[in-house]
Image (tube, rainbow, N blue to C red):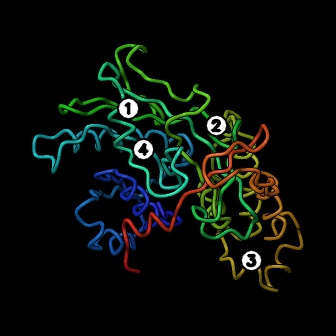
């Protein structure tokens, strides 16, 4: 729903070797023009679902994700599927699947998945959350190079791919895993010191997406809010709930928030002024850039807490040029 840069997301994943993308869309009427481009139209299958009208959007989202994966498996394994699908990876529109060890040029994810022994039906990958250069970041995928090595402001239990070769109808087990007969058929790469693949999570980026995301979550019931394990989520929901009253029950545009009238409107509670909201966002999302001690670009550990990751965007764009 309303992704920040879905064209770059499509371009990246097709360039690194994914054959097809299955996408569930809520709202986002403008996405039709992007998917209709010659570079994408035959490589993306998408379907629309009604925008949810629920109070507990936080918990309902996970149910919607599970249903989306179930439908994608059904499409990928159908007898009339466009092409055989050997593996299906579930990630969100604010995540990139990254193969370490390719500092220059374009990796091929097929090499990774073809190397998985046939005894495994699922592969678990670690996720790593981005930290941003400032609250003014716009192109999150290209401008972000630092990622948390440990911990996160949202989930930290990874994402999985399920084997669908031979039209195996593997089913999701929640939004992060696939349902398998026993743990022995899951290859858990998330515990390896140097994982073969990473899910890079660009959570709540840019700032405007954070506002929209938590505006939609502001009515989360008190008990559900209490049970959310992430302080960043709880505090963001609480802020949007409080500021919603000040804003008259609607989320003002960024121009309105930054204008003179906005300053007057927010004087009753300075915490709801855009500058204060950006400071809150930055307290969780922005870290000073670590010194680049790497000998060259690529997957590098920065001290004990961060990874510096370089994606060769020039090579990505050359591999799959897209007209704007």
How far across and down, in percent of the image, does residue 185 sit? 37, 18
Pointer 1 or 2: first along the chain: 1
Mark 1 vs mark 2: in front: 1
Left or right of 179 on screen, residue 159: right
Say which residue appears at 26% left-offset and 56% top-offset: 45
Residue wearing tag 1: 172
Pointer 4 or 1: first along the chain: 4
How far across and down, in percent of the image, does residue 47 sit? 29, 57
Mark 1 vs mark 3: in front: 1
Mark 2 vs mark 4: in front: 4
Residue wearing tag 2: 224
Query: Do tag 1 and tag 2 residues touch (Cβ < 8 Å)?
Result: no
Residue wearing tag 4: 64
Mark 3 vs mark 2: in front: 3
Secondary element at tag 2: helix
Pointer 1 or 3: first along the chain: 1
Residue wearing tag 3: 257
């Amino acid at each position: 729903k309303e992704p920040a840069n879905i064209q770059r997301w499509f371009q990246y994943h097709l360039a690194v070797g994914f054959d097809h993308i299955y996408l569930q869309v809520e709202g986002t009427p403008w996405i039709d023009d992007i998917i209709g481009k010659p570079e994408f139209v035959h490589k993306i299958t998408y379907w629309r679902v009604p925008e949810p009208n629920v109070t507990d959007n936080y918990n309902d989202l996970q149910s919607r994700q599970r249903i989306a994966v179930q439908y994608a498996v059904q499409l990928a394994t159908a007898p009339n599927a466009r092409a055989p699908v050997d593996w299906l990876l579930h990630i969100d529109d604010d995540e990139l699947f990254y193969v370490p060890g390719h500092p220059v040029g374009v990796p091929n994810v097929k090499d990774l998945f073809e190397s998985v022994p046939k005894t495994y039906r699922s592969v678990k990958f670690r996720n790593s959350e981005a930290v941003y250069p400032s609250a003014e970041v716009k192109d999150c995928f290209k401008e972000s190079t630092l990622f948390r090595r440990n911990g996160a402001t949202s989930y930290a239990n990874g994402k999985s791919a399920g084997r669908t070769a031979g039209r195996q109808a593997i089913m999701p087990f929640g939004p992060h895993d696939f349902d398998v007969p026993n743990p022995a058929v899951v290859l858990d790469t998330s515990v390896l010191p140097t994982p073969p693949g990473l899910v890079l999570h660009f959570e709540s980026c840019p700032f405007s997406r954070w506002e929209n995301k938590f505006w939609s979550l502001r009515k989360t019931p008190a008990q559900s809010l209490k049970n959310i394990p992430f302080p960043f989520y709880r505090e963001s929901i609480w802020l949007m709930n409080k500021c919603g009253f000040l804003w008259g029950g609607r989320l003002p545009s960024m121009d309105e928030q930054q204008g003179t009238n906005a300053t007057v409107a927010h004087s009753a509670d300075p915490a709801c002024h855009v500058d204060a909201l950006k400071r809150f966002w930055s307290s969780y999302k922005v870290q000073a850039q670590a010194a680049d001690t790497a000998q060259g670009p690529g997957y590098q550990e920065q001290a004990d807490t961060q990874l510096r990751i370089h994606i060769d965007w020039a090579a990505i764009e050359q591999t799959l040029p897209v007209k704007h």
